[in-house]
């Protein structure tokens, strides 16, 4: 599986958005600021309350796609997410190799965000199957992930959760 294309790395932005803690009311601006490499330099990260709400809706929809257990559910949720996108393909070589961006470069931050995550997620679902998305099996973690392993065997969001679960299973066996 080739995850080297922009479409595939854009799915990582989608996963990070879905897993972002939203307790802080300023979470959306903070998320944009810590992922600024995804946005046209100079884009304002000030969001109106309505825009911040739409960022949260996008995050929930990404999670809903990852949690969906049937293709009809995936399609419904993916199309709701795509409805938030305003794709206008744009070729660029800003970081070296020529590649495509999905949003117009002068779009507001929210539009760049929703377009990039919706297109990135859809591309992976269409090319590699919705079964590639999942939710972490570790106790106390509900982060979503995209499985880029060769044999689609991933069950955890991170190495941290994987080793934590291995240790927990080992201790449980020792007790038994
Ligand atoms: Zn780029
Ligand atoms: Zn986890």
Image (cartoon, rainbow, N blue to C red):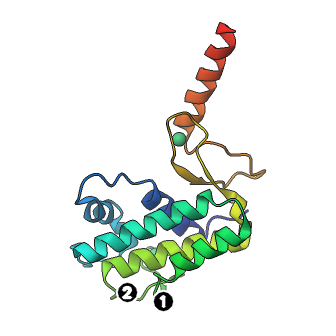
| Ligand 1 within 8 Å, label 1 CB | no
Residue 155 visible in the displayed image: yes
Q: Residue at x 55, y 66 (%)?
A: 11
The answer to whether mark 2 and mark 1 are in CB contact below 8 A is yes
Q: Nearer the viewer, residue 6 or 118?
A: 118
Residue 97 visible in the displayed image: no
Q: Residue at x 75, y 52 (%)?
A: 150
Q: Nearer the viewer, residue 101 or 135?
A: 135
Q: Nearer the viewer, residue 106 or 132?
A: 132
Q: Position of residue 28 (x, y in %)?
A: 30, 64
What residue is shown with label 2?
A: 105
Q: Is residue 169 above or below residue 39?
A: above
Q: Position of residue 147 (x, y in %)?
A: 66, 54
Which disc is residue 90 wearing?
1
At numbered mark 1, what does the secondary structure look like: helix, strand or loop?
strand
Q: Position of residue 48 (x, y in %)?
A: 22, 76
Q: Quadrant of residue 37?
A: bottom left
At numbered mark 2, what does the secondary structure look like: helix, strand or loop?
loop
Q: Earlier in the sequence, mark 2 or mark 1?
A: 1
Q: Position of residue 170 (x, y in %)?
A: 65, 17
């Amino acid at each position: 599986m080739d995850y080297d294309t922009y479409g595939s790395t854009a799915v990582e932005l989608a996963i990070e958005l879905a897993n972002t803690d939203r307790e802080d009311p300023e979470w959306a601006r903070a998320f944009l600021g810590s992922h600024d490499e995804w946005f046209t330099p100079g884009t304002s990260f000030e969001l109106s309350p309505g825009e911040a709400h739409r960022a949260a809706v996008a995050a929930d929809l990404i999670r809903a796609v990852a949690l969906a257990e049937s293709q009809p559910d995936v399609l419904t949720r993916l199309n709701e997410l795509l409805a938030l996108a305003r794709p206008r393909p744009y070729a660029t070589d800003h970081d070296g190799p020529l590649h495509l961006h999905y949003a117009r470069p002068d779009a507001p931050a929210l539009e760049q965000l929703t377009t990039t995550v919706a297109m990135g997620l859809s591309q992976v679902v269409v090319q590699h199957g919705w079964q590639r998305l999942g939710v972490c099996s570790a106790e106390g973690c509900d982060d979503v992930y995209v499985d880029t392993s060769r044999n689609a065997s991933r069950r955890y969001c991170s190495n941290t959760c994987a080793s934590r679960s291995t240790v927990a299973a080992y201790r449980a066996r020792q007790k038994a």
